[in-house]
Image (cartoon, rainbow, N blue to C red):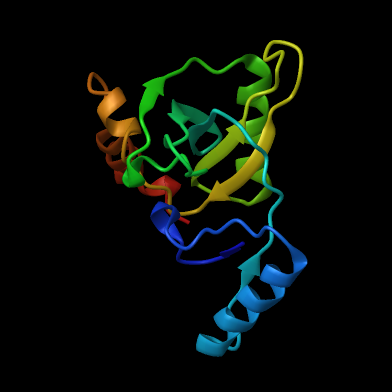
Amino acid sequence: LKSSTGTQTGVGVIIIESMRSLYSSIQMLLLYNKYMPIIIQEFVKTDYDVRSMVLEGKVIGSMKRIVIAGDDFRSNVSLGAESETIEITDIEERDVIKAAEVVKGQLVGIDFIPAKDREKERPYILECNSMPGFGGIEELNKKTSLTQGIFKHFLDRTYWK
């Protein structure tokens, strides 16, 4: 369970263990904000997920995010998850680009869980982030700074929408 807006860094994302806890958690959230937009998302146990940054229909970087050790279930680098470089497959690249197109994003962070057979099966898209954090992915791409590349891209006013 999480808010559909403003939940950067994974803070505020909670696992709901039962319908009873779902009901009371939603009641508590709505007590503080009567119109809070929330998302109920299936929990899929995994050891890691992948974030790919898509800029104007092109993948400009990807990172493997390892789930935080212990009892945590999140893979947010800002919360202490480790990140590693990863080469995504053609299928994964096609699907993350399509996901970014569906949400009409110019710069989108697409989070997904890779399939067991990454070369033949499609990934499980978790979410499309309209304001993705660059923690972890920027450090992994020191040779070609993603941030500098994005700034350079948007210096061309033809990309302004």
Where does residue 93 sit, x and y in percent of width and height? 60, 24
Q: Is residue 29 visible?
A: yes
Q: Residue at x 70, y 17 (%)?
A: 116
Residue at (60, 47) in percent of width and height:
127
Name the one closer to the observer, 68 or 5.
68
Tell me the quarter of the image containing the N terminus.
Answer: bottom right
Residue 72, image x and y in percent? 47, 44
- Residue for point 25% across, 35% down: 148
**Is residue 156 visible from the viewing direction of this image?**
no
The number of callouts visible is: 0
Q: Position of residue 29 (x, y in %)?
A: 56, 79
Using residue 18 as the reference point, say whether residue 45 is left or right of it: left
**Residue at 52% from the left image edge and 43% from the top image edge:** 73
In this orientation, which residue lies closer to the viewer: 45 or 144?
45
Image position of 141 with respect to 133: above or below: above
- Front-lying residue, 104 or 118: 118
- Asked if residue 44 is positioned above or below residue 141 in the image, the reply reads below
